[in-house]
Image (cartoon, grey):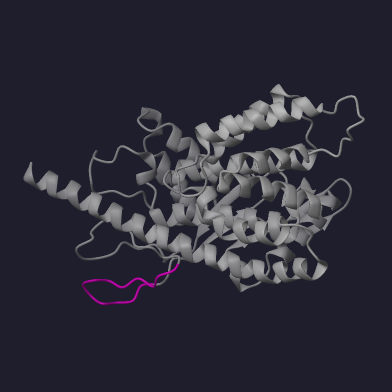
Amino acid sequence: MHTEAHHLEVLNHNFAGQYWSHVSFPRPLFADETVIMETFEKGAVVTDMMTFLGNIGKEENAGELERILQKVGNDMHAVGGVGNDITNGYDLIPLELSQLIVTSGCSLYLKMMIDDGLMHADLHPGNILVRVESGTTGWEDGDDGDERRSGMELRRTSTTTKQRLPPFKGAVKIVDAGMVAKLTEEEQINFVGLLASLGDGDATSAANAILRFSDISDDDKDALTPQAKEDFRRDMATLFAERCRGYRTGTDLGDVLRGILGLIRTYRIRIDANYATLVVNTLCLHGMASKFVPSYNVLDASEALFTPFKRFYMNGPTSPFMRRLFKIYAPLLQRKKNVEDRKFFRKLRRQKTKMLRRMRTSRMIK
């Protein structure tokens, strides 16, 4: 228990500062070998929302979303006003809340993996809580009716009274830090190298990264033979040709990673524990994003960090100076990713606004 308390202190330190003020971990109050006391964190568990999304249309699911959203914030409500026209569950969840969950999850995962080298090793939606500050989620007045405006980056203004509404203030809380993975620089380079290779559609580079996922020597009885390695690279090329053409091509990160895991099992490639943790966390992140915002591509959203990382670390030997330079540069890359995320959600918000307007017009005509 005292080890978990130490993990919480380190994680809170890593995410200190105004830029990460919306992400935090419980703070330990007391701990010894058998007992830990932490601050109580309010909010709704993301798993509950994902369960709702998986049960759309079931009678027992009626009213469940409202109960969940009340835990998020006292004035949070499901998007309404269009009758039975909304058939996708994720369209019932306010877009500003989905944006908070998806972009925060992606950003904090990238920071832990690339900047800190210290990963929460159990980063599934059941360990993520979301909370919205009361009074920052009111409906817009005027022509847009029931549609919510973004609050993460915009100050909202009522279209009828011109009254400025408070900005949306959401927070993400990560719990259960009993297990963490401390990454070596080599592990960071290998795993980020794998993901960057997926973004580039480079099967050979991805295969080589995976073959470095274990420190097993060529003399070990479990080591792959040169022929097996070549066969593995060939099958990786086939997988990439079918499913992974790189950034901005609609590559499904979860589908590709599951295909890679299938090849790892087929060739009995041993991977060390930290790599297994990273793969599982990546799949959890992808699954969460797919539930809340299906059009948000985690791989594309990470390009702002992966491409410079590959340029710094994977084009030959990197000097200590260049490594320090990248650490300074990385927070700026996070901000670049945030800018691109905001552009994506502004475009998505406009699309949803048009969709809801068409629905209301159709109902009025009927």
Asked whether, in this view, residue 34 is left or right of residue 208, the answer is right
- Location of residue 261 in the rendering, given as x and y in whole percent from the top left corner: 66, 30
Q: Please tell me in which quadrant of the rendered image residue 306 appears.
A: bottom right
> Left of 294 or right of it: where is 45?
right
Magenta stretch containing residue 170, yes or no?
Answer: no
| Rendered residue at 88%/52% (across/down) | 32
Most distant residue in the left direction? 365
Up-down relation of residue 176 to residue 257 (above or below)? below
Residue in front for this viewpoint, 202 or 26:
202
Q: Nearer the viewer, residue 68 or 344?
A: 344
Q: Quadrant of the C terminus?
A: top left
321 to the left or right of 156: right
238 is higher (above) or lower (below) than 315: above
Q: Residue at x 65, y 29 (%)?
A: 234
Q: Position of residue 5 (x, y in %)?
A: 80, 55
Which residue shows up at 62% across the image and 43% down it?
282
What secondary structure do most residues of the magenta stretch adopt? loop
Residue 141 visible in image: yes
Indicate the position of residue 190 as horizontal and vertical percent values. 74, 47
Q: Is residue 48 above or below residue 99?
A: above
Q: Position of residue 364 (x, y in %)?
A: 10, 47
Q: Quadrant of residue 97?
A: bottom left
- Answer left or right for 1 relative to 351: right
Is 152 or 171 nearer to us in this picture?
152
Residue 160 colored in magenta in the image: yes
* In the image, farthest residue toward the top: 266
List the single residue furthest toward the right: 219
Q: Which residues are magenta?
A: 153-165
Q: Nearer the viewer, residue 93 or 224?
A: 224
Q: Residue at 28% of width from left, 41% of height from top?
A: 86
